[in-house]
Amino acid sequence: MVSVSARERILIVRLSSLGDVIQTLALPAAIRRSFPQAKIGWAIDAALMSAIEGHPDIDYIHACPRDRWRIPTRLPQAIRGLRGFCEDIRAAGYDAAIDAQGLLISAMIPCLAGIKRRIGFDHRRELSHLFYTERYVSRREYFASGAAHSAHMLALAHAFGCDVGGCEPALPRAPAHARESIAARLDRVVERAPLVVVAPGTQWPSKQWPLEHWRALLEMILTRTAANLVMVGSAADAALAAQIIAHAGEARARVVNLAGKTTLPELYAVIERASMVIGPDSAPLHAAGAARCPHLVGIYGPTPPCRTGPRGSPDMQLLSAHPALHCQPCRRARCRYGSNQCLREVTPAAVFAAVEQALG
C-alpha cells in the first residue's frame, strides 16, 4: 500500500448502474475524510449525472456519453468518442484513479487518460486487470455471498491509504426545486401519517416479487395502518405500479403514484420525506439507505442480502425465503426454472409483519 499526498487529484470511475453508483458514494466520503485537500472527480454515465450532483465530497463530474458507443456499426465513432472523453479526463491532471466498476470500459478509461496510478479489483472480469497498476480483492473474495459489495469498494480506498472505518454511502441532498416539486405533488396526503414509499420495479425479472403479493401487501397497509403510500420507479415501472394500485378501492385516495414521473433528484426528495421504503434489491432501496431513511424493508431472492443489501439506514429488515432454496443465491437475471419461487416464498404477511413492527 502506497499513500498519496494530501493535495493529489483522484478520479473515481463508476459509470453505472444507479444502485451501484449509490453504493459507491462511500468512496468520496472516505477519500475526503483522509485527504481533505484532495480534488475528487467521478466518471459516470451521462444519464446518471444527477445521481451524484451536489455531493459535498465530489469536486468534478465527467459525464460519459457511453450510449453513443454501443452500436457496433459505428465502431469508428465509438473509438473517437472514447478517446475524446479520455482526453477531457487527461486535461484534469489526475494523479490516481480508483475503478470501482471493474469492467473493460471502466478499466480502460484511466489508462487511456494517462493516469499513472490505477487501482482496481483482482477478479479479472473482462480482462480489466490488465489495465491496472495495482489490484486488490480476489475473485473469490469479490463474489463471496457474505461480504458487502460496498466493502469491496472501500477495500480499494483502504489500499489507497484511506481510513474507511464507519464509512457509509451518503446521498446528496435533493436540490430545492426538486423538494418543492415533490411537496406540491404530495400535498393531498395527510402529513401527520407515516409516509411509506413502495418501489416495486427492478431491472432483473428474477428479482420481481409477484403482482398478487404486492396487491395483498398494499391492501394490508391501507386497511390496517394509517400510513399513506407513494409508488416510485422508472418509466419502465409505471405500468406495474398502476396494476398494483388498481384494486385498492376507496383507499386509493391515500396512494400517490409517482412511478415514471420523477427525475432522480425528485426521487431523492421523495425518499427524504419517507418514514419507510419497501422494495426488492433495486436502486430506490439503496438510495433510501444512503439517505438514512428510518426504516427499510427489502425483498430478496436471487441475490444475497448480505452482499447487495443497502447501507446506512438505522433499521433494515431484508427478507428472503426461509429456509433458503437450494438454488439461492443464483445471481441470475432470469430464474432458471421460470418460477421466481424464491420470491414467492416471501409472503405478503411476512412483509407486512416487518412493516407493522417498524411503524410501531
Image: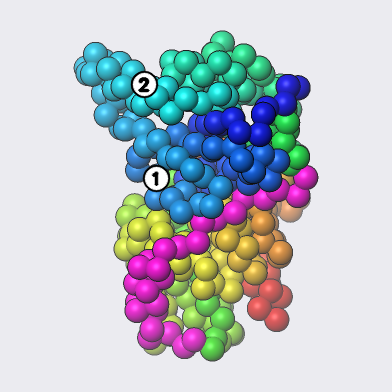
Give the residue displayed 30% in from the left and 16% down from the top.
79
* Precedes in sequence: disc 2 or disc 1: 1
Q: Quadrant of residue 63?
A: top left
Residue on which disc 2 sits: 87
Q: Quadrant of residue 75?
A: top left
Q: CA distance from mark 2 to mark 1?
A: 19 Å
Q: Which residues make up the magenta segment? A: 165-191
The residue nearer to you, when weighing 65 against 62, is 62
Give the residue type at disc 1. Met
Would you say residue 166 sits in the magenta stretch?
yes
- Position of residue 179 relative to residue 142, above or below, is below
Where in the figure is residue 159, as x and y percent of width and height? 72, 27
From the viewer's perspective, tell me whether residue 48 is left or right of residue 345: left
From the viewer's perspective, tell me whether residue 328 is left or right of residue 173: right
Q: Quadrant of residue 319?
A: bottom right
Give the residue displayed 72% in from the left and 26% down from the top.
3
